[in-house]
Image (tube, rainbow, N blue to C red):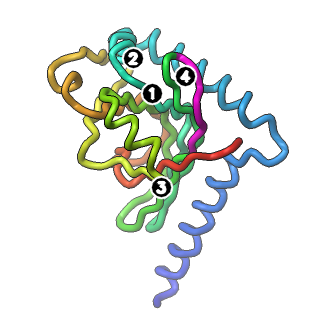
Amino acid sequence: MTLIKKRSFVLGLASAAILAGCGNGIGSNGAARIDGRVDATLAYMYEQHPGTKQLALNSKGMLVMPLVTKGGLGLGGGYGRGALMINNRTVDYYAAAHASAGLQIGVAQYSHVLFFMTEDALREFRASSGWAAGANVEYALLDSSDDLRADTTTTFSPVVAVVFAQAGLRAGLTLEGIKYTRIIP
């Protein structure tokens, strides 16, 4: 292994460890902190993207991830914590973790909400020991000039992911490869 590859490997592992450490709940009021961030994230999303209100009303549940931080240099990782809400009440807390390798450089932060549009999709998510976003997710990437409209794509998709409030310098931001795991904050 060359020195450059070793250095990239070590930097990637260090980045993933630092990012994971940023979100731990040790010594904190974890549940209250997550709930506060979830409320603020939903308020921001509804204000900036009013079309998401109807999507929320039609959904069977929502996983709200207020802040996910991803970074990498060759190897990368990401981490965030959020809450699963059903009927506007928090029922569980989740962590989102991501690891990647390849041609990448940079750091990005963003918020996202997974809208579970069917009872089956919500039940599958809750029953899994670790759920990964995959082909059954329809993505709606939003920025300040876009708005989401509930159309046939979002109506018939079992899970709709709305990604917004992006900041940072990193290309290729998607939710694929993120694993969601239930946590106790």
Q: Within 10 Å of the Cα at label 2, are there few (<14), some (14-19), or many (20+) other Cα atoms? A: many
Element carrying mark 2: helix
Q: Position of residue 107 (x, y in %)?
A: 50, 49
Which residue in the structure is indicated by mark 2? 56
Does 35 sit left or right of 95 as displayed?
A: right
Q: Where does the magenta region start and end?
A: 88-94
Which residue in the structure is indicated by mark 3? 98
Front position in the image: 62 or 46: 62
Say what amino acid the circle numbered 3 marks. His
Say what amino acid the circle numbered 4 marks. Thr
Quadrant the C terminus occupies: top right
Which residue in the structure is indicated by mark 4? 41
Q: Within 10 Å of the Cα at label 1, are there few (<14), some (14-19), or many (20+) other Cα atoms? A: many
Front position in the image: 185 or 99: 185
Say what amino acid the circle numbered 2 marks. Ala
Main SS of the magenta part reads strand
Q: Residue sitting at 52 percent across and 47 percent down?
A: 96
Q: Earlier in the sequence, mark 1 or mark 4?
A: 4
Q: Residue sitting at 58 percent across and 60 percent down?
A: 16
Q: Earlier in the sequence, mark 4 or mark 3?
A: 4
| 90 inside magenta stretch | yes
Element carrying mark 3: strand
Q: Earlier in the sequence, mark 2 or mark 1?
A: 2
Q: CA distance from mark 4 to mark 3?
A: 21 Å
Q: Residue sitting at 29 percent across and 17 percent down?
A: 148
Q: Earlier in the sequence, mark 1 or mark 3?
A: 1
Q: Where, by quadrant of the figure, is residue 154 drawn?
A: top left
Q: CA distance from mark 1 to mark 3?
A: 20 Å
Q: Position of residue 23 (x, y in %)?
A: 67, 46
Mark seen at residue 62: 1
